Image: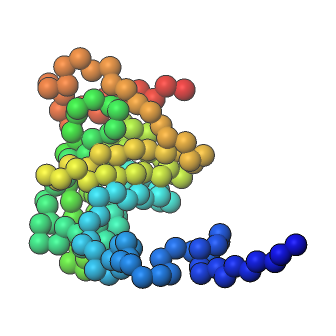
Amino acid sequence: MASTSRTRTGRGRGRGRGRGSGSSSLPPPPSTLPLIIEEFFIVVYEDPLVKKELPKKFADYLDGQEPAKVYLRAADCGPHLWTVEVLFDGQGRMYLDKGWEKFAIAHGVDFGCYVHFKYEGDDVLTLKVFDGTMCRRYYYSDDEDTDDESDDDVKPCIHPL
């Protein structure tokens, strides 16, 4: 029985990749990536019907474009946009104000809810509401003529049980 010895040169299992020569395919470090805040969530710890503070990073993302109002749309609840006034406090904080209460009532936003926001551009935010059990609430609209609906009429989306 002849014994042959082999020398391994870093090709064995579990030794990792990229140890030899070659170019790295790693992405750039986070500090060099552009700041794009398209999605975020808030947790409703306080009265769900009072103004809601949005994350500071999102307010920073809109720096210089501070809209006077935004348009909220509930995912899966038709094309209706809810107009909500926005407040900026001068210290980098952004709040959903007048109009939020109607949206919250119509979509069952309550204590313990998680509200997921997706910025669609043009001051439009699409929202998904999750209840305290972390399950998403699905809605549908029974409106046939949403063009005539105004923000003065709080017509809730229907949340099937």
Residue at the location (29% across, 45% down)?
126
Q: Quadrant of the N terminus?
A: bottom right
- Of the 4 image quadrants, the one containing the C terminus is top right
Q: Residue at x 26, y 66 (%)?
A: 36
Left or right, 5 with reference to 108: right
Quick one: 39 or 28, which is closer to the camera? 28
* Residue 63: % across, % down: 17, 72
Foreground residue among 126 and 25: 25
Q: Residue at x 23, y 41 (%)?
A: 82
**Where is residue 75 shown, x and y percent of the image?**
34, 38
**In the displayed structure image, the side of residue 121 where residue 40 appears, left or right:** right
Quadrant housing residue 90: bottom left
Quarter of the image for residue 159 reads top left
Render colour scheme: rainbow
Measuring 32% from the left and 39% from the top, which residue is drawn there? 74
| Residue 59, visible in the rendered structure | no
Q: Is residue 3 visible?
A: yes
| Residue 57 percent location from the top left of the image | 31, 71
Q: Nearer the viewer, residue 50 or 39?
A: 39
Picture layout, residue 148 above or below residue 60: above
Is residue 9 toward the left or the right of residue 81 in the image?
right
Residue found at the far right of this picture:
1
In the displayed image of the protein, which residue is found farthest to the top?
A: 144
x and y, in percent, of residue 100 in the image: 30, 49
Observer-nearest of 17 and 84: 17
Number of marks: 0
Vertical arrangement, residue 158 with respect to residue 18, above or below:
above
